[in-house]
Image (cartoon, helix red, strand yellow):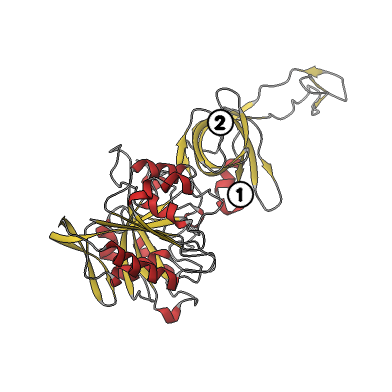
Amino acid sequence: MLHIGIDDTDSLGGGCTTWLITEIISELSELDLVDFPRLVRLNPNVPWKTRGNGALSLVFGKGIGSKEKIGEIGNKDIFMFSNYKELSFNKESILAKVSKIVKKNSKKDSQPGIVISDSYLPEGLYWQGVRGLVSQEDVDLILSDCLTFGLRGSRGLVGAACALSWSSNSYNSKELKSTWELIGYRDKKLWGSSRNISSDSVSRVSQLKGVFSCSDLDGKIAMVPNSPCPVLWGFRGTDRNTLIDNFHHLGPEKPVRWLLYQTNQATDDHFNFSESLDLVDYTSIWTDVSISSKVKIIKGGHRFIKVKDAQDNEVNCAIFEPLKSLRNIVDKLEIGDEVTICGSVSGDTINIEKFKIVNLVPRFTKPPNPICSCGKRTHSSGKNSKYRCNDCGKKYDRPPMIPKSPELDLGWFEPPASSRRHLTKPINLVR
Protein backbone atom coordinates (compact mmCIF):
# COMPACT_ATOMS: atom_id res chain seq x y z
CA MET A 1 0.00 0.00 0.00
CA LEU A 2 0.96 3.62 -0.47
CA HIS A 3 0.32 5.94 2.48
CA ILE A 4 0.27 9.73 2.02
CA GLY A 5 0.13 12.16 4.94
CA ILE A 6 -0.23 15.92 4.54
CA ASP A 7 -0.53 18.86 6.93
CA ASP A 8 -0.26 22.65 7.32
CA THR A 9 -1.33 24.04 3.96
CA ASP A 10 -3.97 26.49 5.21
CA SER A 11 -3.84 29.62 7.34
CA LEU A 12 -6.12 31.88 9.36
CA GLY A 13 -6.74 33.78 6.13
CA GLY A 14 -8.22 30.82 4.28
CA GLY A 15 -7.40 27.63 2.46
CA CYS A 16 -8.27 24.09 3.47
CA THR A 17 -6.10 20.99 3.55
CA THR A 18 -9.12 18.73 3.07
CA TRP A 19 -9.85 20.47 -0.25
CA LEU A 20 -6.26 19.74 -1.34
CA ILE A 21 -6.94 16.09 -0.51
CA THR A 22 -9.74 16.07 -3.10
CA GLU A 23 -7.33 17.57 -5.63
CA ILE A 24 -4.77 14.85 -4.85
CA ILE A 25 -7.36 12.08 -5.21
CA SER A 26 -8.35 13.52 -8.58
CA GLU A 27 -4.71 13.80 -9.71
CA LEU A 28 -3.96 10.19 -8.66
CA SER A 29 -7.11 8.80 -10.26
CA GLU A 30 -5.21 5.82 -11.70
CA LEU A 31 -4.79 4.54 -8.11
CA ASP A 32 -7.50 3.07 -5.89
CA LEU A 33 -8.36 4.16 -2.37
CA VAL A 34 -8.12 1.07 -0.14
CA ASP A 35 -9.01 2.78 3.14
CA PHE A 36 -11.11 5.76 4.11
CA PRO A 37 -9.51 9.19 3.85
CA ARG A 38 -8.61 10.26 7.38
CA LEU A 39 -8.94 13.61 9.08
CA VAL A 40 -6.83 13.50 12.24
CA ARG A 41 -7.10 16.34 14.76
CA LEU A 42 -3.98 16.86 16.87
CA ASN A 43 -3.20 18.64 20.17
CA PRO A 44 -5.37 21.80 20.10
CA ASN A 45 -3.10 23.60 22.59
CA VAL A 46 0.17 23.79 20.65
CA PRO A 47 1.16 27.43 20.01
CA TRP A 48 1.95 26.83 16.33
CA LYS A 49 -1.20 24.89 15.46
CA THR A 50 -2.99 25.33 12.14
CA ARG A 51 -6.54 26.69 12.17
CA GLY A 52 -8.26 23.40 13.05
CA ASN A 53 -5.02 21.54 13.77
CA GLY A 54 -6.10 18.71 11.48
CA ALA A 55 -3.78 16.54 9.41
CA LEU A 56 -4.89 14.26 6.56
CA SER A 57 -3.94 10.85 5.26
CA LEU A 58 -4.77 8.67 2.24
CA VAL A 59 -4.06 5.01 1.50
CA PHE A 60 -3.78 3.86 -2.12
CA GLY A 61 -3.36 0.44 -3.69
CA LYS A 62 -4.87 -1.89 -6.26
CA GLY A 63 -8.41 -2.31 -5.04
CA ILE A 64 -10.17 -5.67 -5.13
CA GLY A 65 -13.42 -6.96 -3.67
CA SER A 66 -16.45 -4.85 -2.90
CA LYS A 67 -16.33 -1.08 -3.15
CA GLU A 68 -18.19 1.72 -1.42
CA LYS A 69 -18.96 5.18 -2.76
CA ILE A 70 -17.43 7.79 -0.45
CA GLY A 71 -17.45 10.95 -2.56
CA GLU A 72 -17.86 12.84 -5.80
CA ILE A 73 -15.15 14.99 -7.39
CA GLY A 74 -15.60 16.63 -10.79
CA ASN A 75 -18.81 14.65 -11.45
CA LYS A 76 -16.87 11.44 -10.89
CA ASP A 77 -17.78 8.95 -8.17
CA ILE A 78 -15.03 8.19 -5.65
CA PHE A 79 -14.89 4.65 -4.27
CA MET A 80 -13.06 2.93 -1.44
CA PHE A 81 -12.25 -0.77 -1.90
CA SER A 82 -12.65 -3.29 0.90
CA ASN A 83 -9.46 -5.15 0.00
CA TYR A 84 -6.33 -4.76 -2.07
CA LYS A 85 -3.46 -6.60 -3.67
CA GLU A 86 0.16 -5.56 -3.61
CA LEU A 87 1.24 -3.09 -6.24
CA SER A 88 4.57 -1.42 -6.88
CA PHE A 89 4.52 2.37 -6.92
CA ASN A 90 6.79 5.01 -8.34
CA LYS A 91 6.83 6.98 -5.10
CA GLU A 92 9.10 9.70 -6.44
CA SER A 93 6.69 10.41 -9.29
CA ILE A 94 3.72 10.43 -6.91
CA LEU A 95 5.50 12.79 -4.51
CA ALA A 96 6.23 15.13 -7.42
CA LYS A 97 2.53 15.23 -8.37
CA VAL A 98 1.37 15.81 -4.80
CA SER A 99 3.99 18.46 -4.03
CA LYS A 100 3.03 20.34 -7.20
CA ILE A 101 -0.55 20.60 -5.93
CA VAL A 102 0.64 21.72 -2.50
CA LYS A 103 3.00 24.36 -3.89
CA LYS A 104 0.23 25.75 -6.07
CA ASN A 105 -2.46 25.91 -3.39
CA SER A 106 -0.81 26.30 0.03
CA LYS A 107 -0.91 29.69 1.77
CA LYS A 108 2.26 31.78 2.00
CA ASP A 109 2.26 31.75 5.81
CA SER A 110 1.83 27.96 6.01
CA GLN A 111 4.58 25.35 6.44
CA PRO A 112 3.33 22.34 4.44
CA GLY A 113 4.65 18.84 4.92
CA ILE A 114 4.06 15.66 2.88
CA VAL A 115 5.02 12.16 3.98
CA ILE A 116 4.86 9.06 1.75
CA SER A 117 5.26 5.68 3.43
CA ASP A 118 4.82 1.99 2.62
CA SER A 119 2.90 1.41 5.86
CA TYR A 120 1.23 3.05 8.82
CA LEU A 121 3.69 4.68 11.22
CA PRO A 122 4.00 3.66 14.93
CA GLU A 123 0.80 4.48 16.83
CA GLY A 124 2.70 5.95 19.77
CA LEU A 125 3.48 8.95 17.59
CA TYR A 126 -0.24 9.69 17.30
CA TRP A 127 -0.73 9.70 21.06
CA GLN A 128 2.22 12.02 21.49
CA GLY A 129 0.83 14.29 18.79
CA VAL A 130 -2.70 14.45 20.17
CA ARG A 131 -1.81 14.73 23.88
CA GLY A 132 1.57 16.44 23.95
CA LEU A 133 4.21 18.15 21.85
CA VAL A 134 6.15 16.56 18.98
CA SER A 135 9.32 18.13 17.64
CA GLN A 136 10.96 17.62 14.27
CA GLU A 137 13.68 15.65 16.04
CA ASP A 138 11.04 13.27 17.42
CA VAL A 139 9.97 12.24 13.92
CA ASP A 140 13.31 12.32 12.09
CA LEU A 141 14.13 8.67 12.84
CA ILE A 142 10.60 7.51 12.03
CA LEU A 143 10.69 9.36 8.70
CA SER A 144 14.09 8.02 7.70
CA ASP A 145 12.43 5.28 5.61
CA CYS A 146 9.82 7.63 4.11
CA LEU A 147 9.79 10.09 1.25
CA THR A 148 9.11 13.63 2.44
CA PHE A 149 8.58 17.12 1.06
CA GLY A 150 8.24 20.40 2.91
CA LEU A 151 8.07 24.14 2.37
CA ARG A 152 8.90 27.24 4.41
CA GLY A 153 10.15 25.36 7.48
CA SER A 154 8.28 22.10 6.81
CA ARG A 155 6.53 22.06 10.19
CA GLY A 156 3.68 20.13 8.56
CA LEU A 157 5.89 17.02 8.39
CA VAL A 158 5.16 16.42 12.08
CA GLY A 159 1.38 16.53 11.60
CA ALA A 160 1.56 14.47 8.41
CA ALA A 161 3.52 11.77 10.25
CA CYS A 162 1.05 11.82 13.15
CA ALA A 163 -1.84 11.38 10.70
CA LEU A 164 -0.18 8.25 9.33
CA SER A 165 0.16 6.86 12.86
CA TRP A 166 -3.50 7.09 13.91
CA SER A 167 -5.29 3.77 14.25
CA SER A 168 -9.06 4.04 14.10
CA ASN A 169 -9.37 0.74 15.97
CA SER A 170 -10.49 0.94 19.58
CA TYR A 171 -8.29 -0.35 22.38
CA ASN A 172 -11.45 -0.15 24.53
CA SER A 173 -14.56 -1.42 22.77
CA LYS A 174 -16.79 0.57 25.14
CA GLU A 175 -15.34 3.87 23.96
CA LEU A 176 -16.01 5.75 20.73
CA LYS A 177 -12.67 5.77 18.92
CA SER A 178 -13.62 7.24 15.57
CA THR A 179 -16.39 9.25 13.97
CA TRP A 180 -17.17 10.45 10.45
CA GLU A 181 -17.32 13.78 8.69
CA LEU A 182 -18.76 14.29 5.24
CA ILE A 183 -17.43 17.58 3.90
CA GLY A 184 -19.13 19.45 1.08
CA TYR A 185 -17.10 21.91 -1.02
CA ARG A 186 -18.18 25.10 -2.77
CA ASP A 187 -17.86 26.20 -6.35
CA LYS A 188 -14.62 28.21 -6.66
CA LYS A 189 -16.46 31.30 -7.86
CA LEU A 190 -18.32 31.39 -4.53
CA TRP A 191 -15.27 31.20 -2.27
CA GLY A 192 -15.23 34.13 0.14
CA SER A 193 -18.95 34.88 -0.23
CA SER A 194 -21.69 34.13 2.29
CA ARG A 195 -22.88 30.53 2.38
CA ASN A 196 -26.55 29.92 1.67
CA ILE A 197 -27.49 27.14 4.08
CA SER A 198 -30.87 27.45 5.79
CA SER A 199 -31.38 26.82 9.49
CA ASP A 200 -34.39 24.64 8.60
CA SER A 201 -32.24 22.24 6.56
CA VAL A 202 -29.64 22.08 9.33
CA SER A 203 -32.35 21.44 11.93
CA ARG A 204 -33.69 18.58 9.83
CA VAL A 205 -30.41 16.67 9.64
CA SER A 206 -29.43 17.46 13.24
CA GLN A 207 -32.31 15.28 14.46
CA LEU A 208 -30.81 12.15 12.89
CA LYS A 209 -29.43 9.49 15.22
CA GLY A 210 -25.70 9.81 15.87
CA VAL A 211 -25.37 13.20 14.15
CA PHE A 212 -23.62 15.89 16.21
CA SER A 213 -22.29 19.47 16.13
CA CYS A 214 -24.76 20.74 13.52
CA SER A 215 -26.17 23.62 15.56
CA ASP A 216 -26.40 25.15 19.02
CA LEU A 217 -29.48 24.81 21.21
CA ASP A 218 -30.48 28.38 20.29
CA GLY A 219 -30.51 27.43 16.60
CA LYS A 220 -27.17 29.00 15.66
CA ILE A 221 -25.63 26.95 12.83
CA ALA A 222 -22.34 25.32 13.86
CA MET A 223 -21.61 23.07 10.85
CA VAL A 224 -21.04 25.95 8.42
CA PRO A 225 -17.65 27.73 8.71
CA ASN A 226 -17.27 31.50 8.81
CA SER A 227 -13.86 31.62 7.11
CA PRO A 228 -13.37 32.22 3.35
CA CYS A 229 -12.35 28.58 2.82
CA PRO A 230 -13.68 26.15 0.18
CA VAL A 231 -15.82 24.20 2.69
CA LEU A 232 -19.59 24.60 2.41
CA TRP A 233 -20.38 22.53 5.50
CA GLY A 234 -19.03 19.68 7.62
CA PHE A 235 -21.63 17.00 8.41
CA ARG A 236 -20.55 14.90 11.41
CA GLY A 237 -21.88 11.68 12.86
CA THR A 238 -21.16 8.22 14.24
CA ASP A 239 -22.61 6.34 11.24
CA ARG A 240 -21.23 7.07 7.78
CA ASN A 241 -24.31 5.78 5.97
CA THR A 242 -26.52 8.28 7.79
CA LEU A 243 -24.33 11.10 6.50
CA ILE A 244 -24.18 9.84 2.92
CA ASP A 245 -27.92 9.19 2.77
CA ASN A 246 -28.96 12.59 4.15
CA PHE A 247 -26.47 15.31 3.17
CA HIS A 248 -28.59 16.20 0.13
CA HIS A 249 -31.19 17.68 2.52
CA LEU A 250 -28.79 20.55 3.28
CA GLY A 251 -29.27 23.66 1.19
CA PRO A 252 -30.30 25.56 -0.77
CA GLU A 253 -26.63 25.92 -1.79
CA LYS A 254 -25.30 22.54 -2.92
CA PRO A 255 -21.71 21.24 -2.95
CA VAL A 256 -19.87 20.79 -6.23
CA ARG A 257 -17.80 18.00 -4.67
CA TRP A 258 -17.94 16.01 -1.44
CA LEU A 259 -15.84 13.46 0.41
CA LEU A 260 -16.29 11.25 3.47
CA TYR A 261 -13.55 11.19 6.12
CA GLN A 262 -12.96 8.89 9.06
CA THR A 263 -11.89 11.09 11.97
CA ASN A 264 -10.82 11.13 15.60
CA GLN A 265 -13.20 14.01 16.29
CA ALA A 266 -15.43 13.71 19.37
CA THR A 267 -13.26 10.97 20.90
CA ASP A 268 -11.70 12.90 23.83
CA ASP A 269 -8.35 11.48 22.71
CA HIS A 270 -6.54 14.70 23.65
CA PHE A 271 -7.24 14.39 27.38
CA ASN A 272 -4.56 13.09 29.75
CA PHE A 273 -6.27 11.31 32.64
CA SER A 274 -4.74 12.33 35.95
CA GLU A 275 -5.39 11.62 39.64
CA SER A 276 -3.91 14.96 40.68
CA LEU A 277 -3.57 18.55 39.54
CA ASP A 278 -0.12 18.00 38.09
CA LEU A 279 -0.35 20.54 35.27
CA VAL A 280 1.75 20.37 32.11
CA ASP A 281 1.56 23.40 29.83
CA TYR A 282 0.08 22.92 26.33
CA THR A 283 -1.70 19.68 27.30
CA SER A 284 -5.29 18.79 28.20
CA ILE A 285 -6.32 17.22 31.51
CA TRP A 286 -9.23 15.11 32.79
CA THR A 287 -9.32 14.87 36.58
CA ASP A 288 -11.57 14.69 39.66
CA VAL A 289 -11.55 17.72 41.96
CA SER A 290 -13.64 19.65 44.47
CA ILE A 291 -14.62 23.31 44.33
CA SER A 292 -12.52 25.39 46.74
CA SER A 293 -13.69 28.97 46.12
CA LYS A 294 -16.64 31.06 45.09
CA VAL A 295 -16.81 32.00 41.43
CA LYS A 296 -15.17 35.27 40.36
CA ILE A 297 -16.66 37.19 37.43
CA ILE A 298 -14.48 39.62 35.48
CA LYS A 299 -15.06 42.08 32.64
CA GLY A 300 -16.34 40.34 29.52
CA GLY A 301 -18.36 37.78 31.45
CA HIS A 302 -15.46 35.39 32.00
CA ARG A 303 -15.52 33.25 35.14
CA PHE A 304 -12.72 31.97 37.35
CA ILE A 305 -13.07 29.41 40.12
CA LYS A 306 -10.55 27.49 42.21
CA VAL A 307 -10.51 23.70 42.53
CA LYS A 308 -8.38 21.30 44.57
CA ASP A 309 -7.46 17.63 44.33
CA ALA A 310 -7.27 14.94 47.04
CA GLN A 311 -3.79 16.16 48.01
CA ASP A 312 -5.09 19.75 48.44
CA ASN A 313 -3.23 21.03 45.38
CA GLU A 314 -5.19 24.05 44.18
CA VAL A 315 -5.44 25.71 40.74
CA ASN A 316 -7.62 28.20 38.90
CA CYS A 317 -10.18 27.15 36.32
CA ALA A 318 -11.32 29.57 33.61
CA ILE A 319 -14.74 29.50 31.98
CA PHE A 320 -14.62 32.03 29.16
CA GLU A 321 -17.52 33.95 27.64
CA PRO A 322 -17.84 31.80 24.46
CA LEU A 323 -18.84 28.86 26.68
CA LYS A 324 -22.15 30.74 27.17
CA SER A 325 -24.63 28.76 29.33
CA LEU A 326 -21.85 26.71 30.92
CA ARG A 327 -21.01 29.84 32.93
CA ASN A 328 -24.48 29.84 34.50
CA ILE A 329 -23.89 26.32 35.82
CA VAL A 330 -20.54 27.32 37.30
CA ASP A 331 -22.20 30.28 39.05
CA LYS A 332 -24.30 27.82 41.09
CA LEU A 333 -21.41 25.66 42.30
CA GLU A 334 -20.51 25.79 46.00
CA ILE A 335 -17.32 25.10 47.92
CA GLY A 336 -17.07 21.35 48.47
CA ASP A 337 -18.96 20.27 45.34
CA GLU A 338 -17.22 17.37 43.61
CA VAL A 339 -16.70 17.63 39.85
CA THR A 340 -14.79 16.01 37.01
CA ILE A 341 -13.13 18.72 34.93
CA CYS A 342 -11.88 18.45 31.36
CA GLY A 343 -9.85 21.28 29.91
CA SER A 344 -6.64 22.66 28.46
CA VAL A 345 -3.68 23.72 30.58
CA SER A 346 -2.31 27.24 30.20
CA GLY A 347 0.31 28.00 32.82
CA ASP A 348 -1.30 27.40 36.22
CA THR A 349 -4.86 27.61 34.87
CA ILE A 350 -7.20 25.01 33.37
CA ASN A 351 -9.44 26.37 30.60
CA ILE A 352 -12.61 24.32 30.97
CA GLU A 353 -14.02 22.45 27.94
CA LYS A 354 -16.68 20.47 29.78
CA PHE A 355 -17.30 19.13 33.27
CA LYS A 356 -19.35 16.60 35.21
CA ILE A 357 -21.00 17.27 38.56
CA VAL A 358 -20.40 14.17 40.68
CA ASN A 359 -21.67 15.26 44.10
CA LEU A 360 -23.19 18.39 45.61
CA VAL A 361 -22.81 19.59 49.18
CA PRO A 362 -26.06 20.47 51.01
CA ARG A 363 -27.35 23.97 50.32
CA PHE A 364 -28.94 26.17 53.00
CA THR A 365 -30.58 29.55 53.14
CA LYS A 366 -30.80 31.96 56.07
CA PRO A 367 -34.19 31.92 57.86
CA PRO A 368 -36.09 35.13 58.69
CA ASN A 369 -35.14 36.91 61.89
CA PRO A 370 -37.30 35.71 64.83
CA ILE A 371 -40.34 37.74 65.94
CA CYS A 372 -40.11 38.93 69.56
CA SER A 373 -42.96 38.20 72.00
CA CYS A 374 -43.68 41.92 71.89
CA GLY A 375 -44.39 41.62 68.19
CA LYS A 376 -41.29 43.34 66.87
CA ARG A 377 -38.72 41.80 64.50
CA THR A 378 -35.43 40.98 66.22
CA HIS A 379 -32.01 41.92 64.88
CA SER A 380 -28.66 40.16 64.83
CA SER A 381 -26.10 41.62 67.19
CA GLY A 382 -23.14 40.03 65.43
CA LYS A 383 -21.97 36.90 63.66
CA ASN A 384 -22.94 33.72 65.57
CA SER A 385 -24.53 35.82 68.34
CA LYS A 386 -28.13 35.74 69.50
CA TYR A 387 -30.91 37.84 68.01
CA ARG A 388 -32.04 40.83 70.11
CA CYS A 389 -35.18 42.90 70.21
CA ASN A 390 -34.27 46.58 70.15
CA ASP A 391 -37.54 47.56 71.85
CA CYS A 392 -37.69 45.26 74.89
CA GLY A 393 -34.17 43.82 74.94
CA LYS A 394 -35.13 40.15 74.86
CA LYS A 395 -32.68 37.75 73.19
CA TYR A 396 -33.38 34.69 71.06
CA ASP A 397 -31.25 31.76 69.81
CA ARG A 398 -30.39 31.78 66.16
CA PRO A 399 -32.84 29.53 64.23
CA PRO A 400 -31.37 26.67 62.15
CA MET A 401 -30.55 27.25 58.50
CA ILE A 402 -33.22 26.13 56.03
CA PRO A 403 -32.22 23.45 53.46
CA LYS A 404 -32.70 24.53 49.86
CA SER A 405 -32.51 22.94 46.43
CA PRO A 406 -29.12 23.25 44.68
CA GLU A 407 -30.91 24.00 41.39
CA LEU A 408 -28.33 21.73 39.75
CA ASP A 409 -28.43 18.17 38.50
CA LEU A 410 -25.65 15.62 38.61
CA GLY A 411 -24.12 14.79 35.23
CA TRP A 412 -22.23 16.30 32.31
CA PHE A 413 -22.38 19.92 31.17
CA GLU A 414 -20.90 21.35 27.96
CA PRO A 415 -20.72 24.56 25.92
CA PRO A 416 -22.61 25.15 22.64
CA ALA A 417 -21.46 23.12 19.63
CA SER A 418 -20.03 26.24 17.99
CA SER A 419 -17.67 26.71 20.96
CA ARG A 420 -16.71 23.05 21.37
CA ARG A 421 -13.32 21.77 20.27
CA HIS A 422 -13.20 19.22 17.45
CA LEU A 423 -11.77 16.50 19.70
CA THR A 424 -14.10 17.02 22.66
CA LYS A 425 -16.86 14.43 22.84
CA PRO A 426 -20.41 15.87 22.98
CA ILE A 427 -22.35 14.65 26.00
CA ASN A 428 -25.02 13.10 23.76
CA LEU A 429 -22.34 10.62 22.62
CA VAL A 430 -21.18 9.71 26.15
CA ARG A 431 -22.07 6.08 26.76
Which residue: 71% across, 30% down?
A: 368
- Residue 373, compared with residue 112, is above or below; it is above
**How many C-alpha atoms fall within 10 Å of the one at disc 1: few (<14), some, or many (≥20)?**
some
Q: Where does the image place residue 20, in percent across and percent down from the top left?
A: 38, 68
Q: Where does the image place residue 181, in percent across and percent down from the top left?
A: 34, 59
The residue tagged 2 is 277
Secondary element type, mark 1:
loop
Q: Mark 2 touching mark 1, by CB under 8 A? A: no
Q: Which part of the image, by quadrant, shows the C terminus? A: top left
Quarter of the view holding residue 347: top right
Left or right: 132 with respect to 250?
Answer: right
Quarter of the view holding residue 7: bottom left
Q: Residue furthest left?
A: 65
- Residue type highlighted by circle 2: Leu
Q: Earlier along the polypeptide chain: callout 2 or callout 1?
A: 2
- Residue 117, compared with residue 296, is above or below; it is below
The residue tagged 1 is 320
User: Cα distance, mark 2 to mark 1?
Assistant: 20 Å
- Residue 219, compared with residue 195, is above or below; it is above
- Residue type highlighted by circle 1: Phe
